[in-house]
Each structure stands twice: as structure tokens, then as C-alpha cells.
Amino acid sequence: MLTRRAVLCAGGAGIVTSLAGCGEATDMTSYEKAVRRLREPLPGHAGLADCVRYATLAASGHNTQPWRFALGVRTVEILPDVARRTPVVDPDDHHLWASLGCAAENFLIAARAVSLHGDVRVDTEDERRLILALERGPAGTDDLFEAVPRRQCTRSDYDGRPVAAADLKSMEEAARVDGVRIVYLLDKPRIATALDHVVAGNTAQMEDPAFVEELKHWLRFNEGSALETRDGLYSASSGNPTLPDWLASMLFPLVFRTSSENDKYARQIRSSSGIAVFVSAKDDREHWVKAGRAYQRFALKATALGIAQAFVNQPVEVAALRSGFAQWLGLEAGERPDLVVRFGHAPPLPMSLRRPVDAVVI
């Protein structure tokens, strides 16, 4: 997901440890079954609806899944679901449109497996939608396609091992989209300075009550809540304990503190192999979509290579800090730092859910 949060951790660990597993009375097997069904490989007779399912496995801010799909014979439209906006953390809808780019890329990767080829563009007559024009061609799959059901944002500590230079090059090449480039931060001094920017952004967000309320709206503290909505940030997917909603609501203001969150991000970034910053040539909707596409391809290649990744987007989410971050990166005039992603090695966490296809097709 493009925005990030793990909630009951760090300073609250002592409070919640003895209560771990005391979530709403729901059979965890039901959650696991839902995950398996959602992430099944495309069937041999796959159609556009199956491609939509793969599209929904893309990243999105707070796992809001702010997309709708209109399916035609050879044209697919992807439209924003404005009811799923996050206006506090994403006031200009940058992350929303990057999320649509992520979904579009997953759709195109799946479509190629069923002999449909195409590209995506922002509609020049109505900039409120993306258009995917598809044509028949030879079926083809690759390691990105195989990685679609397994990709996740792994929001945990990594093991600190470096990523091989060949793998860094492979991820950068996979993410090559016209108008978007990656700036790698690999040496410890640069990563340490990037951490300073993350902490500054995180502190600003944590001190904004509206941000905290918006985030809390999208948190799912237990299996029952996650199964009911099939969206949002599920605690177990962030490596945190599951709790009943009533207890989580009581503990949330006690453990979700600026200091503990800053400590968590410091620990996680220091355990990472490096950071990739996705930079757009222009700050407009077309390039936000391209940044999402580039990130999605990067993340899928990382998954194929056994490399974990997760967003640390605070320096680009806080508008007052974004220009300073861009200046520190040495960006050219007009360029925008879109997404900030840490990467390294770590075991996967429980997968998050997505809404069913019939809920997103119009």
C-alpha cells in the first residue's frame, strides 16, 4: 500500500503481548481460505474479470483500493472511486492516481497471459479515467506475472543483508517507464539522512489529529473486521497482534505515539539494504500514474527475486517537506519525488485481502 502504518508495536508491545490472538471470534482458517481464493493463479479459461482480480492485487494507499473498472470488448476503463479517497494524507490525490497506475500495470500483465496486449493512458478528454486499449496477440507470461499473487508490502524489520548489484539493476530495468526514474540510496550516510526526512514527516503526521483519525478509519485490528470489509490495513499483515475492536480502540491512543513510531521506522530503515525513490519528470496526473506503474513493476521483480519491500512515504506525503527532500536528492527543476520504498530481505507476512471483483466492476 502506498501509505504505511503499523499500529500496536514498539512502545505498546508490553501492553498487547499478553492479549495477542484475542481478536474477534473468527476462524483464522476462514481468512486464510479467503486469501488463497483471492490469490489463485489465473485459470486456463481466464477472461477480463480474472484480469481485474489480478489488478486488485496491486498496491494502494491504506489498502483503500480506490478503483472501479468498466469492461468493454477491447477497451477497459479504470476510474477513481472518490468515496475511497484519503484527503488528509493524500490531499492532491497523488497516491490515488499512483494506485490506479499500479492496478493498470497488474491488469496489463495478466491480460498478456490471455493473449491481450495494450497500454494505458490518461483520457485526454476526461482526465478522470484511465483507458486501456487491448488487442489480440500471442499469450505470454514472465516472472512479474508469476509474482503478482505473492507481492506484498512487508512492513517488518529486515535482516540487513545487502541486495546484489545484479538484482538492483534487474529491479531498476523492470521498473523502466518513460518519464520515471529511480534514485537508489545505498550507503549508510545517505540512508541515515533519508531516515531524518522520514522521521520529520512522520512527526508532522502524528501531530495532526485529522491524520490519525483518517488512518484509524482504515485500520482492521482482527480477522473479523478484515473479512467484513476486505480492505484497509490488517494488523497481522503489519506483523502486529490482532485484538478485539473494543480493546484496540482503548489501546490505540496509548500506544500509537510519535516516539514509538519514529523508533520503529528508524529500526526498520536501518535494517533495510537500501531505499528506492521513484521520481517523475513532471508533477501531473499522467506521471503519477506512470510512477505507480513503475513501482508495481519494481515490486513484482523484487518479489520474483525474493526481496522484500515497503513504503516509507512520509517525506513525499507532507507537502511542506517534499521540496526539501527533492533538493537533498539533487532533483532537477520540475521533477517530483513520488514514492519512497525501502527494500531488503525478510520472510513474508500474512497477506492482505481485496474486495471481490463484482464490487469493483461497474
Image (cartoon, helix red, strand yellow):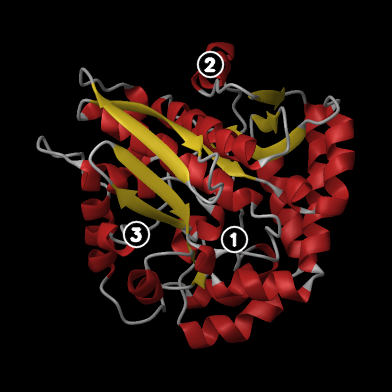
Q: Nearer the viewer, mark 2 or mark 1?
A: 2
Residue in the picture at 45% in, 33% down: 120
- State left or right for residue 56 relative to residue 7: left
Q: Residue at x 29, y 77 (%)?
A: 26
Can residue 146 be seen in this snapshot? no
* Three-letter amino acid code at the position of disc 1: Ala
Q: Residue at x 63, y 78 (%)?
A: 252
Q: Earlier in the sequence, mark 3 or mark 1?
A: 1
Provide the secondary structure element on which disc 2 rests. helix
Give the x, y percent position of residue 267: 70, 47
- Say which amino acid is labelled 3: Val
Image quadrant where one finds the C terminus:
bottom left
> Marks 3/1: CA distance?
27 Å
- Asked if labels 2 and 3 touch by Cβ distance under 8 angstroms, the answer is no
- The reply, left or right, for residue 340 in relation to residue 155 is right
Furthest residue in direction front, as rendered = 125
Residue 191, image quadrant: top right
- Image depth: mark 3 or mark 2 in front: 3
Residue type pointed to by label 2: Glu
Left/right placement of residue 279 relative to residue 192 reads left
Q: Mark 1 or mark 2, which is nearer the start of the sequence? A: 1
Q: Quadrant of residue 213?
A: bottom right
Q: Under tag 1, what secondary structure?
A: loop
Number of the label disc, if any, that sits on residue 360: 3
| Residue that mark 2 sits on | 173
